[in-house]
Amino acid sequence: MPRSRSKPAPERLRAERAGRRAETLAALYLRLKCFSILSRRLKTPVGEIDIVARRGALLVFAEVKHRKSIDAAAFEAVNTARIAKAAQWFLATRPEFSGLDCRFDVIVLAKGRWPHHLENAFSLS
C-alpha cells in the first residue's frame, strides 16, 4: 500500500522559502554584475542548476546556498558532480551556447550579509 503524502513540516517550508528568496537575491546580484539570467531552477534529467547566466561570451552555472553564516561548510555542501552533469546536459541540448566559455560559481547568502560570490569555484576536470 502506498504511503500517504503528509504536509511538509513547517521548518521545511521555511527552509524552502528561504532558499527561493536566496536564489532571487543571487539572480539580482548577478544582474547588478551585468549578467543576463537565462534560467532559474533549471531541472534536467540529471540534476538541477539554480541559475544559468550569461555575460558576453561567458556562461555561468551558479549554485546558490542559504546559510546562517558564510563559512567553508556552505561551499563544501555543493554537489559538484551533479551540477557538472546538469551543465553538460544543458550544453548538449542547447548548441547555441556551445562556443561560450563556461564557469561554475557558488553564491552563498546569509541574513544581514552581502552575498559571497566564489567565481570559478570548480571545473569539469
Image (cartoon, helix red, strand yellow):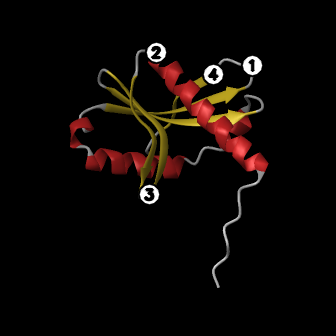
CA separation in Å, label 1 and label 4: 9 Å
Q: Mark 1 against mark 3, which lies toward the viewer?
A: 1
Secondary structure under tag 4 reads loop
CA separation in Å, label 4 and label 2: 12 Å
Inspect this view and state whether residue 101 appears.
yes
Q: Which residue type does callout 2 highlight?
A: Lys
Residue 33 circle label = 2
- 125 to the left or right of 111: left
Nearest to the observer: residue 81 or residue 30: 30
Q: Which residue type does callout 3 highlight?
A: Val
Q: Residue at x 41, y 58 (%)?
A: 45
Residue 115 circle label = 4
Q: Position of residue 120 (x, y in %)?
A: 49, 30
Q: Mark 1 against mark 2, which lies toward the viewer?
A: 1
Q: Position of residue 107 (x, y in %)?
A: 58, 29
Secondary structure under tag 2 reads loop
Sequence-wise, the earlier of marks 1 and 3 is 3
Q: Which residue type does callout 1 highlight?
A: Gly
Q: Which residue is mark 1?
A: 112
Q: Which residue is mark 3?
A: 46
